[in-house]
Amino acid sequence: MHLDVVDLRNFYCRTGLGRAAQKVICERVRELWPDTRGQTVVGFGFAVPLLRSYLEESRRVIALMPGQQGVMRWPASGPNISVLCEETRWPVETGHVDRLILMHALETSENPAGLLDECRRVLGPGGKALLVVPNRAGLWSRSDATPFGVGRPYSLSQLEALLRRQSFIPERHRSALYQPPSQKRFWLRTGQFLERTGRRIPRLYAGGVLIVEVSRRVHAPRRPGLTEAVRRPLEVLDGIARPGARPVSRIP
């Protein structure tokens, strides 16, 4: 089940809780990817709250939005870079993406394996992806007041197992949104304190979202025999006289 793009925009732009969530997740993403100069950055789902900070420094930024969700013009000022597309068929060339961010995407996907296959297709050599998904153990996945309460939440072990099956290598992970998903002023005021506290004791207080960084697993080619002949093989028994062995010159 996908949320409507208007509901997502209203949550992040017009509610205090949405603005607080956007700020916290952006900070965590920036910790992982502080510099994208000269790189192509793509977001899928509703990743525009996280893409904004990369607009100025990146070579190219593209916001892909699935048809079931709908699309909006973004950014409001400047040329539009948002594109409506099918979930498993993106208008992006193979191997041209350096950094890929998925938010409000995997947990609502009708075909998670196909979506991850498309992620793998567009990532180039050395490319990395960040997946932002609701934490199954957190409070945000249990609340209908936020977009993270929609779809299929994951535990870290479940998410990493899915990613490995789709030929990804999990590298780093972070948690965020330790504050309760409440619009009450008290919780909004104490949000930053709860975030700092939650990072120190993550085993006791689960964050609302998981942020997992992955890279592509490159399989070795399966071909019989050597790819090229060894012209001058090393003598294993160097210095030992053997019948028919050619003499080996020593370095003075």
Image (cartoon, grey):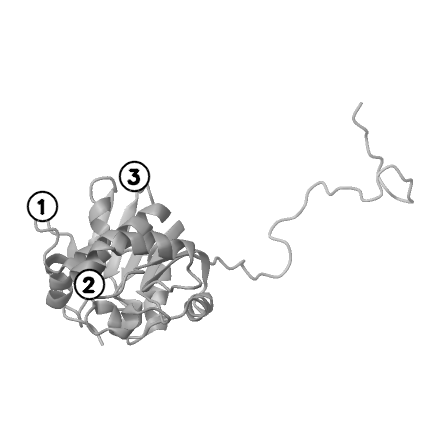
Local SS, label 2: strand
Mark 3 vs mark 2, CA separation in Å: 24 Å
Q: Is residue 20 above or below residue 58?
A: below
Looking at marks 3 and 2 on the same chain, the residue that comes earlier in the sequence is marked by: 3
Can you see residue 96?
no
In the displayed structure, 29 sits above or below 168; it is above
Please provide percent x and percent y for residue 156.
42, 66
Structural crowding at the residue carrying mark 2, measured as other residues with C-alpha within 10 Å and reported as few (<14), some (14–19) or many (≥20) = many
Dots 3, 1 in contact, CB < 8 A: no
Compared across the picture, whether 52 is left or right of 99 comes to left
Label 1, secondary structure: give it. loop
- In the picture, which quadrant includes the N terminus? bottom left
Q: Is residue 113 left or right of residue 50?
A: right
Residue at 34%, 51% in the rendered image: 196
Instruction: Determine the residue positioned at 56% across, 62% down.
Output: 222
Q: Nearer the viewer, residue 248 or 110?
A: 110
The residue that mark 2 highlights is 65
Indicate which disc residue 119 carries.
none
Q: Place residue 134 in its image quadrant.
A: bottom left
Mark 2 and mark 1 lie on one chain; the one further toward the N terminus is 2
Looking at the picture, which amino acid does disc 3 mark? Arg
Give how far across and how far down residue 103 sits, in percent: 27, 62
The mark found on residue 78 in the picture is: 1
How many marks the image carries: the answer is: 3
Instruction: Give the residue pinned by disc 3.
Output: 37
Q: Amino acid at mark 2?
A: Met
Q: Which amino acid type is shown beneath numbered disc 1?
A: Gly
Q: Secondary structure at mark 3?
A: loop
Q: Position of residue 122 (x, y in %)?
A: 33, 57
